Image (cartoon, rainbow, N blue to C red):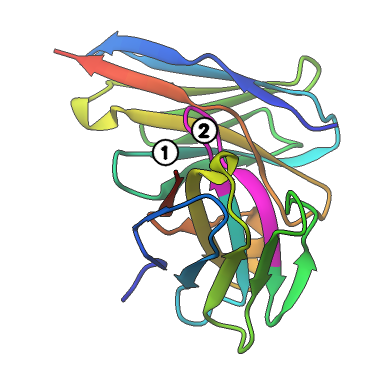
Amino acid sequence: GEDVEQSLFLSVREGDSSVINCTYTDSSSTYLYWYKQEPGAGLQLLTYIFSNMDMKQDQRLTVLLNKKDKHLSLRIADTQTGDSAIYFCAERTGTASKLTFGTGTRLQVTL
Amino acid sequence: GAGVSQTPSNKVTEKGKYVELRCDPISGHTALYWYRQSLGQGPEFLIYFQGTGAADDSGLPNDRFFAVRPEGSVSTLKIQRTERGDSAVYLCASSPEGGGILTGELFFGEGSRLTVL
């Protein structure tokens, strides 16, 4: 079955790097995603990675995928207060239309 | 508007009542999704429409939940005989045909918060 797990909370200081981790159970996942949810706003796609890749970089964001351990991480360089939000990883399996989301990690950025 | 619009933003109802939640997707998006997000949890899939038809309704929890999209644009999620456990934020998302579906990018609305007393 599909199950996606994340730690609940992460606190970092402004300017430091943040690393948010995610584990999933379905080895047939085709795409994995990171979504951001700010208070009072809808979820917004930050980045995604195809399962045949092990790394993807997009400006301050770096996604690492370890398929063997079914582990996904999101690194945010030079974290800013505007990065404070809840971050969800999600997986998509095969041609299924639905995404399975994790429970979300609340990132708190302190001055 | 440019984004996915959901109404109402907040709905308080009593146990046993009937509720309708509306979603207006981004113009031209053929795929529409409903998710439910309980407090402290990630979104859970309910149903997916491709055009007017429900392509996957495997996430609907029971037969009290039903959704329609009669003209392939606006969708309504209908909940009969509401229960306290139905309290959650109901999220709607849309995506364009082709690239959006292949990459899985969903464009979410801000959600309708349902509270069942």
**Quadrant of the rendered image containing residue B117:** top left
Q: Are marks 1 and 2 in contact (CB under 8 Å)?
A: yes
Q: Is residue B108 left or right of residue A52?
A: left
> Between A108 and A52, which is closer to the camera in this rendering?
A108
> Between B40 and A106, which is closer to the camera in this rendering?
B40
Q: Give the residue displayed 58% in from the left and 39% down from the top.
A: B85
Q: Give the residue displayed 64% in from the left and 55% down from the top.
A: B103
- The residue that label 2 is drawn on is A88
Q: Magenta stretch: residue B7 in it? A: no
Say which amino acid is labelled 1.
Lys
Q: Give the residue displayed 79% in from the left and 32% down from the top.
A: A2
- Considering the image in quadrants, where does the N terminus of chain A appear? top right
- Chain letter for mark 1: A
Tell me, yes or no, if residue A76 can be seen here.
Answer: no
Q: Residues within 10 Å of mark 2 (few under 14, many from 20)?
A: many
- The residue that label 1 is drawn on is A36
Where residue B4 appears, x then y in whole percent? 42, 67
Where residue A22 appears, x then y in whole percent? 61, 21
> Between A4 and B105, which is closer to the camera in this rendering?
A4
- Name the secondary structure under disc 1: strand
Look at the image and give the residue range highlighted in magenta: B36-48
Where residue B48 appears, x then y in whole percent? 69, 63
Q: Is residue A110 left or right of residue A37?
A: left
Tell me, yes or no, if residue B62 can be seen here.
Answer: yes
Say which amino acid is labelled 2.
Phe
Total labels: the figure holds 2
- Name the secondary structure under disc 2: strand
Query: On screen, B2 above or below A97?
Result: below
Q: Give the residue displayed 48% in from the left and 59% down from the top.
A: B107
